[in-house]
Amino acid sequence: MTDERLRRRFQRRLLTWYRRHGRDLPWRRTRDPYSILVSEIMLQQTQVERVIPKYHEFLRKYPTFDALARAPVREVKRTWYPLGYNTRPVHLHGIARETVARYNGRLPDDERALRQFKGIGPYTAGALLSFAFKRDAPILDTNVRRVLGRVFLGPRRLKVLRGQKAWWDLSAALVPKGKAYDFNQALMDFGATWCMPRNPRCLPCPMKAFCKSYPLSLPSPPLGRGLR
């Protein structure tokens, strides 16, 4: 799991794959922490296709932390509909109000401060640090765990690697210096569109030469759908 040559090989192949296959998503065209926060909260348990139109609508109505903080929470929940999981707009509204009150409308770029907000867990904090603040921070969600587990651990991954800390350590060890933004986006895209839970695209996979789980499915089917 910690072999330097294998890490570099994985990094190079994933970044090359991303340059060819990465999705063109609206929140990837900005480094604005507020816009990225909105996208990350919306993407929790919701498919990309459903999030895109609501993301544009939400930012048109509430373009800044200040605009969102001044809006009544009931109105924010109505705007959020029909994404579901109604605690998310409440949390986002609370983050906006606290950001305005405590940080003059600027989201802090410190992991500990970010984790103090209700609604920002370890994944969202890592995403904000790497996508909005150019930090070499790891991320870990279902897609990322699946990719790393398959490639580096194989079928016995749940027995080999126990506990959240071990998974976070593995993810952190793989982040290439200065390239966390592209690398983390690539991990999510790869898990969502190629290394899927069912019918992964094993045949054209650039990792198959060293993947501990290859082959999972042959021949590879067309692209499937999944979260993110």
Image (tube, grey):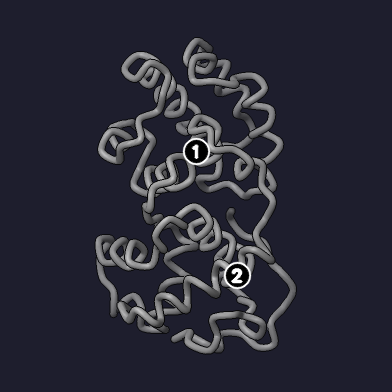
Q: Which residue is mark 2?
A: 16
Work out whether residue 125 or residue 110 is closer to the camera in this orientation and state it: 110
Name the residue carrying label 1: 41
- Residue 196: percent from left, percent from top: 58, 69
Whether residue 187 is situated above or below residue 117 in the rendered picture:
below
Q: Residue at x 36, y 64 (%)?
A: 171
Given the image, on which type of amino acid does mark 1 rest? Ile
What separation in Å lies between label 1 and label 2 (alpha carbons)?
Answer: 28 Å
Q: Position of residue 110 (x, y in %)?
A: 30, 37
Whichever of labels 1 and 2 marks the residue nearer the N terminus, that label is: 2
**Badge 2: few (under 14), some or many (20 or more) residues near its Cα, within 10 Å?**
some
Q: Is residue 62 left or right of residue 9?
A: right
Residue drawn at x 70%, y 87% as measured from the top left:
219
Number of numbered discs visible in the structure rendering? 2
Q: Nearer the viewer, residue 16 or 107?
A: 16
In this rendering, the answer to whether 48 lies above or below 194 is above
Residue 206 left/right relative to 134:
right
Q: Are marks 1 and 2 in contact (CB under 8 Å)?
A: no
Which corner quadrant holds the N terminus?
bottom left
Q: What residue do we see at 55% from left, 75% from top?
A: 13
Q: Identify which amino acid the numbered label 2 is placed on.
A: Thr
Binning the other alpha carbons within 10 Å of mark 1 as few (below 14), some (14 to 19) or many (20 upward) gives: some
Relative to 156, does residue 46 appear above or below in the rendering?
above
Residue 103, disc: none
Q: Is residue 34 left or right of residue 108?
A: right
The front one of 23 and 226 is 23
Q: Report x, y in % for residue 209.
A: 53, 89
Q: Quadrant of residue 83?
A: top right
Q: Is residue 69 left or right of residue 46?
A: left
User: Mark 1, mark 2: which one is toward the viewer?
Assistant: 2
Residue 206: x and y in percent read 59, 80
Q: What residue occupies the far right of the structure in this picture?
A: 222
